[in-house]
Image: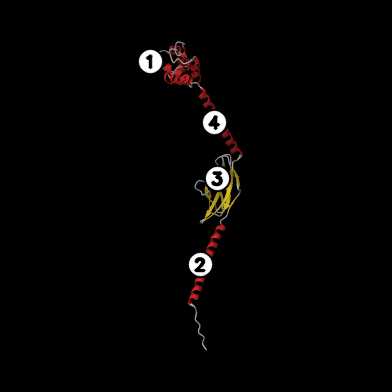
Amino acid sequence: MVIVGVTNPSSEDSTTKEDKKETVSKKKEEKSSSKNSKESDLQLSLNSTEIETDDNGVAKIIGKTSPKANVSVGMGIVGDSTEADSNGDFSLDYELSGDSNKEITIYSTLDGNTKNSKVTIKPNAQVLAAAAQKKAENEAAKKQAEEQKAQEASIPTEYKSALRKAESYSKTMHMSKAGIYDQLSSDYGEQFTPEAAQYAVDNLKADYNANALEKAKSYQDKMAMSPEAIRDQLTSDAGEKFTPEEADYAIQHLNQ
C-alpha cells in the first residue's frame, strides 16, 4: 500500500516568512549589540568633578578617554577642544566668567560615538576677592554719580549759567581766574551775583598756566612787547590779573 501525502503550500510559505523574520531580527540585534559594544568601549573619566580656577579665572580640566578621541568643552563650538594622546590623556582650559560656580559638560567623541561627563568650575579666593572689589568700586561709583546728580539738580540755574560763561572766557579768551570773576560779576560785564561768579570760577576746570602763555604769545606777536613788559601786563590788576607763578610759566615757555 502506498500512502500519498499532500502538503499545504500556504503553511510552507508561512514557515519560510517566519524564518526570514527571525534572521532579520537576529541581524538587528547583532548590529545593536555591536554598536552598544563600541559605545561601551569609549571611556571618559575626569580627575575631578569640582575644579577651582587659577588667579586669572582659568580652570584646567584633566582626564582620560579613549586614545585619539576628540574631547571638548560643550560641543566645542565656543569652548576649548583637543585630541586625547595615545594613552587617552587630555587637558582642557575653561575660562570662568563671573564669580559664581558654573557646571559645564565635557564631551568625548570617537568614530561617531559620544560620551559626556559634567564638571563644576569654581572661582578661587583671588578671583572672588577681585570680583568683590570690583563690585564695591562699581557701587561706590554709582553712589557718587547719584550724589553728584542730586547735587547738580540743587544748583541754581544762575550758577550753571555763570559756569558756562566762565568756560567760554577761558577757552576763547584765555583769561585768568581773577579776570573771569571780574568779568562775570561786573556791572559792565555779565552782571552775575558775586555768589554765582564765585561758584563758576571755583568749579571751572581750566589750565591757567596755558591761558597765561596764550596771552603772552598774543602780546608778543601783536604788540611786539618785551618779556618783562609782558610779565607786568599779565600780573597787573589793571591788566590780565594772572598770578606771578602763572606769569613766570608763560615767560619761560614763550619761545618754546
**Residue depth check, mark 2 versus mark 1: number of the one nearer the observer:** 2
Q: Are marks 2 and 3 in contact (CB under 8 Å)?
A: no
Depicted 191 relative to depicted 47: above or below? above
Depicted 7 relative to depicted 77: above or below? below
- Which mark is first along the chain, 1 or 3? 3
For the residue pair 4 and 133, the one nearer the viewer reads as 4
Q: Which residue is mark 1?
A: 222
Q: Which residue is mark 3?
A: 93
- Which mark is first along the chain, 3 or 2? 2
Q: Are marks 1 and 4 in contact (CB under 8 Å)?
A: no
Circle 3 packing at 10 Å, graded few (<14), some (14-19), many (20+), is some
Q: Position of residue 23 (x, y in %)?
A: 52, 69
- Which mark is first along the chain, 4 or 1? 4
Q: CA distance from mark 4 to mark 3?
A: 35 Å
The secondary structure type at the circle numbered 1 is helix
**Residue depth check, mark 2 versus mark 3: number of the one nearer the observer:** 2
Q: Which residue is mark 4?
A: 142
Q: Amino acid at mark 1?
A: Lys
Q: At x 53% / y 28%, what residue is drawn?
A: 146
Depicted 30 relative to depicted 231: above or below? below
The secondary structure type at the circle numbered 2 is helix
Q: CA distance from mark 2 to mark 4?
A: 73 Å
For the residue pair 51 and 26, the one nearer the viewer reads as 26
Q: At x 59% / y 38%, what residue is drawn?
A: 128
Q: Which residue is mark 2?
A: 24
Q: Amino acid at mark 4?
A: Lys
